[in-house]
Amino acid sequence: MKQIVVDSSTLITLLDTDNFNLLFKFFDEIIITNEVYKEVTNKSKHKLTIDTYIKHAKIFSQSITYDEFYEILIKRLDRGESESIVLAKKLQLPLLIDEKKGRSVAKSLGIGIVGLIGILLKLIESNKITKNKAIEIIKEVEANKFRLSDNLKALVYEFD
């Protein structure tokens, strides 16, 4: 069973662009923190979708302990990122996160990280989506104001 802890920004972007189901082509379960749940469902249009997946045991919302580790992280990152990093470390699971600072902190703590481009590459490699579909998704998320570096996009555009 493949599980991953997911931060809010990529999750919101995938929901906004109707590409959310991509995550379930690669992961069986998505784990989010209570704060990420709040951030994602703050847009009421996403609440029904997230709650439906929680009801069907595909997404799990989990609380964290606000300990010294969290208190250190919250000084550098937002609540959702801090909680996600704490939970990924505790559960020893990879973390889906795209914000540069959050990725850097997670990496420094030995947490396996993946971003949207990494997910797209894994899906192409496993023949679950085509390269053209991945490029289409990149264009959709960028039109939704999700920023991706040219270097990362090149990994998909130049994929053979």
Image (tube, rainbow, N blue to C red):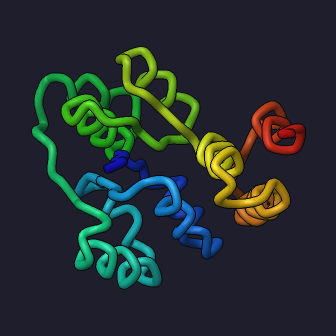
Residue 70: % across, % down: 22, 30
Give the tally of numbered discs: 0
As drawn, 139 above or below 104: below
Which residue appears at 59% of the width and 72% of the height? 16
Which residue appears at 38% of the width and 72% of the height? 42
Q: Is residue 50 left or right of residue 139?
A: left
Residue 32: % across, % down: 30, 54
Residue 31: % across, % down: 30, 53
Q: Is residue 94 left or right of residue 57?
A: right
Which residue appears at 39% of the width and 36% of the height? 94
Which residue appears at 33% of the width and 34% of the height? 85
As drawn, 149 above or below 128: above
As drawn, 111 above or below 118: above
Nearest to the observer: residue 116 or residue 25: 25
Position of the C terminus by quadrant: top right
Q: Is residue 11 left or right of residue 18?
A: left
Nearest to the observer: residue 144 or residue 71: 144
Q: Is residue 46 left or right of residue 83?
A: right
- Location of residue 83 by image quarter: top left
